[in-house]
Structures are given as C-alpha cells and as structure tokens.
C-alpha cells in the first residue's frame, strides 16, 4: 500500500525540517508534525519559525496548509497516519544507571506507548531519533503489549544525517538515506513503502537498506567517526602551535590524499552541538555494556580531547593576559555551536564563557542569531551564579560595541561576517595591548599582526 498519510512525533531541529522537505517533495502525502510543546507548534505555524536554518522558510511556506501541518493534537495525528516517524529527543541520561553516558529513552518509550494506545490497523513506525542499537526490540515489545485495538506494527530504523546550518541542502540532496528493517516479508514491504517516499526526489542507488541493527549502529558510528576527525586535527593544532607549523596547511596537505579526504579537518576551540558528545558517550556505554572496555576507552578519548581543547583555550587567554582576567572586559564573538544556526546546545562557547566568568572576567557577548535569554540561560545551566551573570555579562547587538574598551577579543563561532571585520577600527576601540584569541581561525594572523594586535590563532605557530 502506498503511504498516504505521515505523522512525526517531535517538531524539533530534525522533525520540523525533515517533514517539511518530505511534504514539499511529496504533494500527494499528508504530513502532520505533532509535538507536546505548544509554544514550538505555535512558532511553526507563525512567520517566525522556531529553528533558524538557511532556506527553511521557503520549504515550509511551499507546503504548509497544503499537505504540511503542525499540531499539538498528537492522538489524532497518530490515528490518521499510515507511517509514524519518532523524532523525539534522546539526551544523555543524567540520573541512575548509566548517568552521564547512556541515552535517556523515556521520550521514546512514552511515544511508543501512546502510539500503541491510539493505533488501529497496520502502521509503520520509523525510528528517526538517534538511539542505542537494539532499541527497536524495546519499541516492538511495548507496541505488542499495549495495543487494545489489535493494531499491528512494523518497526524501521531511518536515522537522520543532516547537519544544522546546512539542513536544507542535506535533506534535498543527502549522501545517502539509510533504512533498516526486519528480514520478514512484512518487514521488507515496510522498507519498500518508506523507500518509495524518498524515491520522490532521491535516486534509488543512494537509498541504502540494511538490517535493523546495522542501521541503528551506523548512526552512532557515523557521528563518532566525524567527531574523531575533529579531535584528531585539534590534537595536531596544539602541536602546530608548539612547533611553528600551521594546522590549516597540514590539514590541506593530508586532506589531498584521497584516502584521508579534506572534510572535517578544520581545527577549532572544540566541537559542540547536541549530538557528537551525546552519541559518542552512548557508544562508549554500549561498549562497556557488551564488555568491550578497550573499545569504550578508545572512543572516550575523542570526548576527553575535546574537553581539553576547550580548557586549554581558556588557559591560553588567562596566561596571556598576565595571569589574571579579573575585572577585564573580554569581547566574545559567536555563541552558537557553529555558524548558520541559532542552536547553542553543547556549544564550546558555553564552557569557555563559564570558565572565564569563574576567573571574574567581564564578558561582552555578540552572536548574530542567538538571543540574550538563551545565552543567560545556558550560562546559568552551566553553573554560573545568576548574580555573576547580571553583573559580569553584557549582551551586545553588534561586534564593535562588544570590543569597545575590551582588553581582549575571542572568536568562538565561525560566522562568515567575522572574516570581514574592520580590524583597524577594532584595534582603535580596544585597550592596548589589544589581544585577539581566534578559536576558529577565521582571522588572518598576518593581518592581525600588521594591525598591531597581540594575536593567537588556533593551530598557528607564533
Ligand atoms: P529537539 O529537542 O529539538 O526536538 C525534540 C522534540 O520532541 C521536542 O520539541 C519535544 O517537545 C518533542 N517530544 C518529546 N516527546 C514527545 C512525544 N511523546 N510526542 C511528541 N513530541 C514529543 O531534538 P532534535 O534536535 O530534533 O533531535 C531529535 C533526535 O534526532 C535526537 O535523537 C537527535 O539525536 C537526533 N538527531 C538530531 C540532529 C540535529 O541536528 N539536531 C541530527 C540528526 C539526528
Ligand atoms: C552532526 C553531523 O555532521 C550530522 O551528520 C549529524 O546528523 C548530526 O551531527 C546529528 O546527529 O545531530 P551538527 O552537529 O549539526 O551535525 O554539525 P557539524 O557540522 O557536524 O558540526 C559539529 C561541531 O563540530 C560544530 O561545533 C562545528 O563547529 C565543529 N566542527 C565541524 C569543527 O570544529 N571542525 C570541523 O572540521 C567540522
């Protein structure tokens, strides 16, 4: 049976954009995105979407009201759907067994119980969230034990590989679509039904089908490999600084070897985002659970190196500013975890700002997309005393206001606009010596030195 009606539980960074793309590309399918969060749903139905993503507004506008709907009526959305994506959060567990490593699956379980309760007839349930391998077994067991109306279910795994900031191009032209299903006749029919949805715009040869466990595990492994490349190049950034080598030149030289490849070799103050750390810790926990301590330890190092990269950046600032930043104004350019997003989850900027505030610095923070409330909430959640946030944090609406009267400037997100800052003007606005700490290598070391700055650029030897 061709799919006519799709529902997605979770209208977040994945559910919203992914379903908008499906609706835009499949005008014959009704797509309803359902969420418990009324504010979020109201925002999806407004002119100001809850997610900032280049190109997203146009995709949503092309389908909303036609075959794309956002609702809080989750039960009705489930009841009407042939196929249900589960795209709820799977954060790191903060309590009990596996705290700090395991995935917290309570939202997945609650979604499965609600689907079981409401459903009638045959439904395909698709894991879109990132989950530990074997979660499909738990979902199947919950569905089978809790269906008063005798509904039957096929469970598929279809992890999402989009990156924030490039979500629309990633969804429009993905490297691959991965679908895992059971080897039974019904399982394969469900796989084919989902394949036919994606085939509306993605060539069949880019749609990969596997068994359930390979699909679930591949998502964690893909993120672990990507994050591992960043920690690898960041480890080399420290060696470059010590030896006079240039990490961008090294990355270019090794990246031209087609066996290594050029992507994901940009040294930084540390990777952030809601997923890399969470998914690696989840992988580490899985390895420990399956009694593979050597494998667990290997992947744990990727996160350790990332933590070290963030703390050594702060240490560099404090040591360079004559071992004290107490009372000094430091301009922070960029708070989002990467450019072209308003998302700050696990942003390196949070840890850097927290540690500078604990050193009693005054921070003047500018980010083109992140609002003041988010910055204040993130710092409070990271353990900064709310009183210190009031006295020592100023949120600026443009970069030149942030640098005025500052002892130092630190770039923490690679926003394109930072590449064309007016350096002579900035130098004139800052106290002297004017220190720059570029955690994203968006500024040119030679230009900074020529303008009279005392400059540190990540991965560049003096
Ligand atoms: P998010 O926190 O932005 O959104 C999750 C949404 O699910 C929230 O709005 C929440 O209210 C809603 N929700 C929770 N329980 C629900 C229920 N029972 N019914 C309906 N809605 C419910 O999370 P996200 O960033 O969209 O990530 C979702 C999943 O996708 C995670 O597992 C994540 O690891 C994975 N993922 C995220 C990205 C990314 O770029 N953010 C990329 C690939 C995969
Ligand atoms: C990442 C993956 O790239 C996606 O494929 C995956 O779907 C997603 O996680 C997920 O599962 O959530 P995302 O975190 O949105 O996507 O963004 P990335 O482009 O991967 O960047 C992650 C972090 O690494 C950012 O802080 C970025 O600045 C940093 N980064 C990235 C570097 O420091 N250097 C690089 O070379 C690349």
Image (cartoon, grey):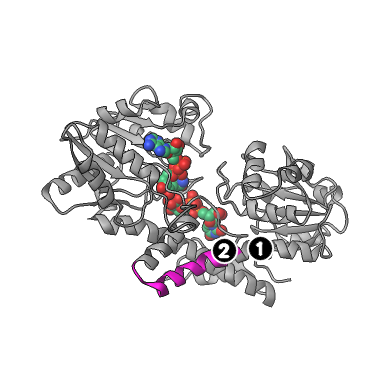
Q: Is residue 97 magenta?
A: no
Q: Secondary structure at mark 2?
A: helix
Residue ID for mark 2: 306
What is the quadrant of residue 316 in the picture?
bottom right
Characterize the magenta stretch by its predominant secondary structure: helix
Number of residues whose C-alpha sits closer than 10 Å to that of mark 2, classed few (under 14), some (14–19) or many (20 or more): many
Q: Secondary structure at mark 1?
A: helix
* Image coordinates for residue 303, horizontal then vertical, percent: 52, 64
- How many marks on residues? 2
As displayed, is residue 72 above or below residue 147? above
- The response on whether ligand 2 sits within 8 Å of label 1 is no
* Image coordinates for residue 27, horizontal then vertical, percent: 30, 29
| Apparent side of residue 122 relative to residue 180 in the rendered image (left or right) | left
What is the quadrant of residue 86 in the picture?
top left
| Apparent side of residue 452 relative to residue 345 in the rendered image (left or right) | right
As displayed, is residue 236 above or below residue 219? below
Query: In the rendered structure, which segment of residues is drawn in magenta?
Result: 290-307
Q: Is residue 294 magenta?
A: yes
* Image coordinates for residue 92, horizontal then vertical, percent: 47, 53
Quadrant where the image shows the C terminus: bottom right
Residue ID for mark 1: 311
What is the quadrant of residue 448 in the picture?
bottom right
* Image coordinates for residue 6, horizontal then vertical, percent: 28, 33
In the picture as drawn, the residue positioned furthest to the right comes out as 432
Q: Residue at x 37, y 47 (%)?
A: 129
Q: Residue at x 16, y 48 (%)?
A: 188
């Amino acid at each position: 049976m061709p799919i006519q009606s799709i529902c997605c539980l979770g209208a977040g960074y994945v559910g919203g954009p992914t379903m908008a793309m499906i609706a835009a590309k499949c005008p014959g399918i009704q797509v309803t995105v359902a969420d418990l969060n009324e504010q979020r749903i109201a925002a999806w139905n407004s002119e100001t979407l809850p997610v900032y993503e280049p190109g997203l507004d146009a995709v949503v506008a092309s389908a909303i009201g036609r075959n794309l709907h956002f609702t809080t009526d989750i039960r009705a959305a489930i009841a009407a759907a042939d196929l249900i994506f589960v795209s709820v959060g799977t954060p790191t567990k903060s309590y009990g067994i596996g705290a700090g490593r395991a995935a917290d699956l309570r939202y997945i379980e609650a979604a499965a119980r609600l689907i079981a309760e409401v459903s009638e007839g045959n439904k395909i349930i698709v894991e879109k969230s990132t989950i530990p391998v074997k979660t499909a077994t738990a979902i199947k067991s919950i569905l089978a034990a809790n269906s008063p109306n005798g509904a039957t279910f096929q469970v598929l795994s279809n992890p999402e590989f989009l990156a924030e900031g490039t979500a629309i191009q990633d969804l429009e032209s993905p490297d691959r679509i991965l679908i895992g299903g059971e080897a039974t006749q019904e399982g394969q029919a469900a796989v084919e039904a989902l394949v036919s949805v994606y085939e509306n715009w993605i060539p069949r040869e880019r749609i990969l089908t596997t068994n359930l466990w390979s699909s679930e595990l591949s998502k964690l492994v893909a993120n672990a490999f990507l994050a591992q490349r960043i920690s690898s190049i960041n480890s080399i950034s420290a060696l470059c600084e010590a030896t006079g080598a240039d990490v961008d030149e090294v990355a270019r030289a090794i990246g031209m070897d087609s066996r290594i490849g050029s992507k994901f070799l940009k040294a930084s103050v540390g990777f952030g985002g809601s997923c890399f750390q969470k998914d690696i810790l989840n992988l580490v926990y899985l390895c420990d659970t399956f009694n593979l301590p050597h494998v667990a330890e290997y992947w744990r190092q990727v996160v350790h190196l990332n933590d070290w990269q963030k703390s050594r950046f702060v240490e560099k600032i404090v040591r360079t500013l004559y071992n004290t930043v107490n009372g000094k104004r430091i301009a922070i350019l960029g708070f989002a975890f990467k450019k072209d997003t308003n998302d700050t989850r696990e942003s390196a900027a949070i840890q850097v700002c927290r540690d500078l505030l604990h050193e009693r610095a005054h921070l003047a923070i500018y980010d083109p997309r992140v609002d003041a409330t988010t910055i204040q909430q993130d710092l409070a959640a990271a353990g900064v005393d709310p009183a210190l946030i009031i006295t020592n944090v100023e949120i600026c609406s443009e970069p030149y206001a942030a640098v005025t009267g500052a002892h130092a400037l630190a770039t923490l997100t690679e926003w394109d606009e930072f590449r064309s800052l007016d350096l002579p003007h900035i130098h004139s606005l800052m106290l002297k010596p004017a220190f720059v700490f570029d955690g994203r290598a968006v500024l040119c070391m030679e230009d900074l030195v020529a303008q009279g700055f005392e400059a540190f650029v990540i991965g560049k030897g003096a």
